[in-house]
Image (spheres, rainbow, N blue to C red):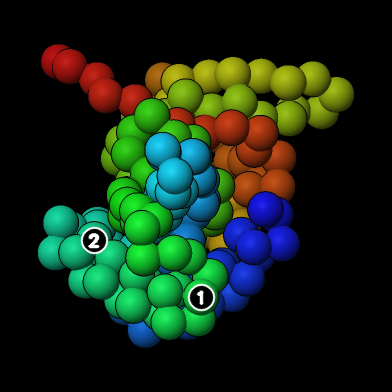
Amino acid sequence: MNELLEKIKTQVEPVLDRLNAYLIDLTYSKVKNAYKYVFYVDKDTYVTVEDCSIISRELERILVDEKLISPDDQIEISSPGVDRPLKFLRQYPKHKEKYFSVTFKSDDKTMTKEMVLKDVVGEKLVFDDRGKILEINFSDIIKAKTLIKFK
């Protein structure tokens, strides 16, 4: 199945590039006599319902034509949502001024902090940790998730 997923990703990436989107993750599950494929996609702006609809139609056509999936299989397109950690540096800029839970390497230890993302400068993420500016290399981030804060 891993080889099939890689072939699917190879077909999907040019379609997403053309639509200014990119693949975050691809999961699948068995549903009766078929498979359900969930494509988590993102954009440098926010993913809309219309984006998901367009991507779904394009991917289904290509993947069925290439015989990578069956016409009985299901395709679902989703944005990553707040429950999924950010995986790529390019996901961060649109989340400036948002709260994050960030687990990162600092010297020889692992730390987790809740902070506000202030900026992205090259490979560095600049956070406000209760008034103190903290710069973290993207490569040192183990896990980062946006948080919903109610005031």
Could you say which disc has been placed on residue 114 in the image?
Answer: none
Q: Which residue is mark 2?
A: 52
Name the quadrant containing residue 71: bottom left
Residue 112: % across, % down: 59, 18
Q: Which residue is mark 1?
A: 67
2 or 1: mark nearer the eye: 1
With respect to residue 51, does 96 lie above or below? above
**Toward the viewer: 101 or 136?**
101
- SS at mark 1? loop
Q: Amino acid at mark 1?
A: Lys
Name the quadrant containing residue 134: top right
Residue at the extreme front: 33
> In this orientation, does residue 61 appear?
yes
Image-based side of 4 in relation to 79, left or right: right
Residue at 50 percent across and 81 percent down: it is: 66
With respect to residue 57, does 62 lie above or below? below
**Toward the viewer: 53 or 23?**
53
Q: Amino acid at mark 2?
A: Cys
Image-based side of 34 in relation to 148, left or right: right
Residue at 74 percent across and 28 percent down: it is: 106
| Sooner in the amino-acid sequence: mark 2 or mark 1 | 2
Q: CA distance from mark 2 to mark 1?
A: 22 Å
Residue at 43 percent across and 82 percent down: it is: 65
**Toward the viewer: 114 or 48?**
48
Residue at 19 percent across and 64 percent down: it is: 53
